[in-house]
Amino acid sequence: MLYYISRPKRLKICGVETMDYNYIILQLILMPFIGAFIGWETNVLAIKLIFRPLKPVNILGFQMQGLIPKRRAEISKNIGETLEREVLSSDDIVERLTSDNIKRQILANLKNIVEEKANEKLPAFIPQPLRTGITAYLREVVDRHGEDIFDELKANLVSKFREEIKLGMMVEEKINSFDLKQLENLIIKLSRKELRQIEILGGVIGFFIGLVQAVFSYYVNFFR
């Protein structure tokens, strides 16, 4: 990020040659802001090139395409594998769905359902005391064997989940199903704040580079 700086004009005042300080002050003011604009615009363009062009285009014999459109399949696969390996696996989902709290709720609901279905299906001629005894017995069976049945179902569920549910593949397929513009909008929406910070950082760095160049140029021209 270098700019050509012409030598400041020298004026003669009362026969004494002196530098045009208005010209120097103008350079000291303009160069940092020009640098800030170039730095900001460069980062804006770099961010745009992450997504655009959506399709390959030939420029001076070189094929160009945005990073994400070009490598979407690879990126989606890596995201899916990382998510399943490091963030959320099938076993994690099963463990959460079969936690002790969920188990207690399921067994309590199961007892209520068994009691309701028993009262519904038992013939009307059965005396109420006998009906009550039957439903109480069924509730006792659930209390006695419910946890064993639940644990067995949990083991089967884990096995089925591992065979049938591939979270990484599901995420990969979902990302690949997005339209490129839809995917671009989604990424920008999720990282808008960070992308804005990158743009601003480019402007800040450009400003200070321009300021250093302006000061350096001043001293070089001063001692000529």
Image (tube, rainbow, N blue to C red):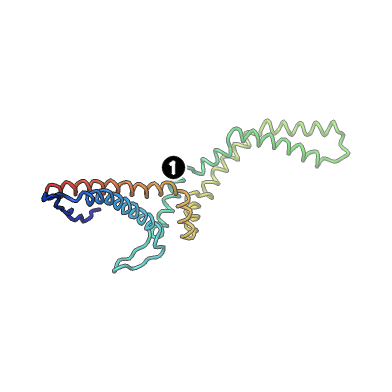
Q: Residue at 65% across / 37% down in the picture?
A: 106
Instruction: Depth check: give the residue in front, 42 or 167.
Output: 42
Asked whether, in this view, residue 218 is left or right of residue 90, the answer is: left
Asked whether, in this view, residue 189 is left or right of residue 120, the answer is: left
Q: Secondary structure at mark 1?
A: helix
Residue 76 spot, x, y in % from top left = 44, 53
Residue 180 spot, x, y in % from top left = 46, 60
Asked whether, in this view, residue 12 is left or right of residue 175, the answer is: left
Instruction: Depth check: give the residue in front, 151 or 223.
Output: 223
Q: Residue at 58% across / 37% down in the picture?
A: 98
Image: 208 above or below 129: below
Residue 41 spot, x, y in % from top left = 34, 55
- In the rendered image, the residue lying farthest to the right is 125
Image: 221 above or below 108: below
Instruction: Depth check: give the residue in front, 168 or 223.
Output: 223
Q: Residue at 29% across / 68% down in the picture?
A: 60
Residue 49 spot, x, y in % from top left = 37, 58
Q: Exactly how many numbered labels are in the figure?
A: 1
Label 1 belongs to which residue?
86
Q: Amino acid at mark 1?
A: Glu
Determine which quarter of the picture holds residue 123: top right
Determine which quarter of the picture holds residue 53: bottom left
